[in-house]
Amino acid sequence: MHAPVSILPLRLENVSYAVRGKILVDSLSFALERGRRVVLLGPNGAGKSLTLRLCHGLVKPSAGKILWQGAPQGEKRLRHAMVFQRPVLLRRTAFANLVHAAGLAGLGFRDRRIRAAEALEHFGLTPFADRAARSLSGGEQQRLAIARAWALRPEVLFLDEPTAALDPAATRAVEETIRLCHADGMTILMTTHDLGQARRLADEILFLHQGRLAESAPAPKFFEEPRTEGAQAFLRGDLLW
């Protein structure tokens, strides 16, 4: 059985998004290459979360192109998944949340239950299988949401502030979940305000400011030698608007 054709690289070509004449993302161009962990950094309002939503197809650009490669058009939407800052979980058990997602992806009754059990075990969540998903802690819910995405075997995983408002222990657990996804072959594009997290997880940094891509660099180079004044100010902790 042949491996599925990759949908990567993902290319954004001069992508803009405007609402009532206000430009929120402006002429954004970059490529997401297979196997990379790319972190979007920037101040509030820079367009980070919106960029993820554009890539995932939740909103359409006002101008420009978002181009997935390789796989037939009908398959591409199923090959990338997104986990939000506040996970959207059903009023069901953790196991049932995973089973439901696998069913929406077209798996049969037996296969969806197998896939759900695999995901819980893979991420150390089996003890929570019969717990109501919404009764779990914030960190546990986030790990469950990532496990639910993993169960669908996406090639690309979009993560929007996956550890916002979590304590250090929960943050560490979520970061390990992200590392497992990457080790399993997933390409990661995520946002974070946690510079330490970006240092720990990123291969590459895309720095956004006022809706534009101000700087793109390998993570070590970005943190050691930021080229632009905006990135330098951001790393110093100065507010940018």
Image (tube, grey):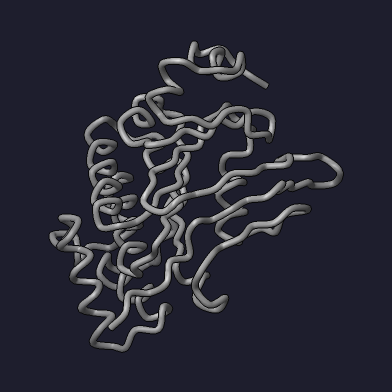
> Farthest right residue?
21
The location of residue 36, given as percent across then percent down, is 39, 46
Q: Is residue 109 left or right of residue 114?
A: right
Residue pictured at 85% horizontal, 46% vertical? 20
The location of residue 45, given as percent across then percent down, is 64, 33
Q: Is residue 91 left or right of residue 31?
A: left
The location of residue 229, given as percent across then percent down, is 61, 13
Residue pictured at 26% horizontal, 30% vertical? 168
Residue pictured at 33% horizontal, 45% vertical? 138
The location of residue 165, given as percent across then percent down, is 39, 34
Q: Nearer the viewer, residue 184 or 237?
A: 184
Q: Indicate the quadrant where residue 238 lies.
A: top right
Compared with residue 64, is residue 49 higher up or lower down, i.e. above or below? above
Residue pictured at 50% horizontal, 76% vertical? 75
Compared with residue 23, is residue 61 higher up or lower down, i.e. above or below? below
Q: Nearer the viewer, residue 129 or 134?
A: 129
Q: Quadrant of the N terminus?
A: bottom left
Count of marks, rendered view: 0
Compared with residue 200, is residue 185 higher up or lower down, i.e. above or below? below
Compared with residue 12, is residue 48 higher up or lower down, i.e. above or below? above
Q: Is residue 158 left or right of residue 210?
A: left
Q: Quadrant of the C terminus?
A: top right
